[in-house]
């Protein structure tokens, strides 16, 4: 029997989603919403950090899956951004596409985003607050010093895997979450967000985007890349509405 693949779709409102058994639409920040959105799986059941969604973004769905979801492969996409079936197709990847890619490597990532004239570090501090990265580096130095060389290298590169999108074999997924969330929690304890606007208050989602490559590089894990696309309307085949399940 094939091992189960579950791709979380991070959603905060009713939206169309692919009618594929591997996709699981998750209402992020469900603890902050009343009433819940019909047809979504809320992220505030079991062990969860749903109430932190304004700062953790789609990572509240990731945490919920880590603690509560039983699947051999777990991934994360967004309600408008998917791994595509093929580049420029405007069609989300289907379960067969994921299975084919995961036969070649245990991790699937989006094609890297290139900045060309900026480093990952300079791009971040121009878009957000520099103290986010300074505090993150200090936490790594204290708690995970083996990851510090890769962190410094990644900050000086001009490309990286973004959007907190991936699909991983379960043991890799567990390892990643067990590493990521303690780091973010420690950074959270040290940052004063009182002066952050609503956009920059999503800081831990932004920081996590920069940490994924650090974790992969340090561990030397193999991965495959796949194009991802913004799919805003009913461009894809086999669409259903989450709110009508």
Image: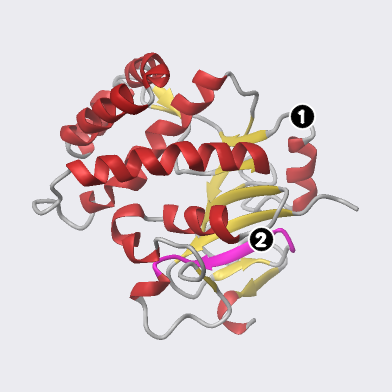
Q: Which residue is farthest front?
A: 143
Q: Kindly report the distance in space between the C-alpha atoms of the residues bearing marks 2 and 1.
A: 21 Å
Residue 162: give x, y in percent of width and height: 44, 37
Q: Position of residue 69 (x, y in %)?
A: 62, 59
Q: Is residue 238 above or below residue 98?
A: below
Q: Which of marks 2 and 1 is nearer the N terminus?
A: 2
Q: Mark 2 points at which residue?
A: 23
Q: Position of residue 220 (x, y in %)?
A: 58, 18
Task: Determine whether the residue tagged by mark 2 lies in a helix, strand or loop.
Answer: strand
Query: Residue under circle 1?
Result: 104
Q: What stretch is highlighted in magenta?
A: 21-29
Determine whether, in the image, residue 200 is placed left or right of residue 111.
left
Determine if the magenta segment contains residue 27. Answer: yes
Choose top left, top right, bottom left or bottom right for residue 115.
top left
Name the residue at the left extreme: 195
Q: Is mark 1 on a helix, strand or loop?
A: loop
Q: Crowding near pointer 2: few (<14 within 10 Å), some, many (20+)?
A: many
Crowding at dot 1, Cα within 10 Å, few <14 / some 14-19 / many 20+, comes out as few
Label drawn at residue 145: none
Q: Quick check: is 96 in the magenta stretch?
A: no
106 and 142: which one is in front? 142
Residue shown at the point (66%, 53%) measured from the top left:
91
User: Residue 76: x, y in percent?
Assistant: 56, 50
Quadrant placement of the C terminus:
bottom right
The residue furthest right is 1
**Is residue 95 or residue 240 the one in the foreground?**
95
Q: Is residue 227 visible?
A: no
Residue at image point 58% right, 75% down? 242
Which residue is rendered at x = 52% and y = 37% of the image? 176
Left or right of 5? Residue 232 is left
Residue at 34% across, 74% down:
32
């Amino acid at each position: 029997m094939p091992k189960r693949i579950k791709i979380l779709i991070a959603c905060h409102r009713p939206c169309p989603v692919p009618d594929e058994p591997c996709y699981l639409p998750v209402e992020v920040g469900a603890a902050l919403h009343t009433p819940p959105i019909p047809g979504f799986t809320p992220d505030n059941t079991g062990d969860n950090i749903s109430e932190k969604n304004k700062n953790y973004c789609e990572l509240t769905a990731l945490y919920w899956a880590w603690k509560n979801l039983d699947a051999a492969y777990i991934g994360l996409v967004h309600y408008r951004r998917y791994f595509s079936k093929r580049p420029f197709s405007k069609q989300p990847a289907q379960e067969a596409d994921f299975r084919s890619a995961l036969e070649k490597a245990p991790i699937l990532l989006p094609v890297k985003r290139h900045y060309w004239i900026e480093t990952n570090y300079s791009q971040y501090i121009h878009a957000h607050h520099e103290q986010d990265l300074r505090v993150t580096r200090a936490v790594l130095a204290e708690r995970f010093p083996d990851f510090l060389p890769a962190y410094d290298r990644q900050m000086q590169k001009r490309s990286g895997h973004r959007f907190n999108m991936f699909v991983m074999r379960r043991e890799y997924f567990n390892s990643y979450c067990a590493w990521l969330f303690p780091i973010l929690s420690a950074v959270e304890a040290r940052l004063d967000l009182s002066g952050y606007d609503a956009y920059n208050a999503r800081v831990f989602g932004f920081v996590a985007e920069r940490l994924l490559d650090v974790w992969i590089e340090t561990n030397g894990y193999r991965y495959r890349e796949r194009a991802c696309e913004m799919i805003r309307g009913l461009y894809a085949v086999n669409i259903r509405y989450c709110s009508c399940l």
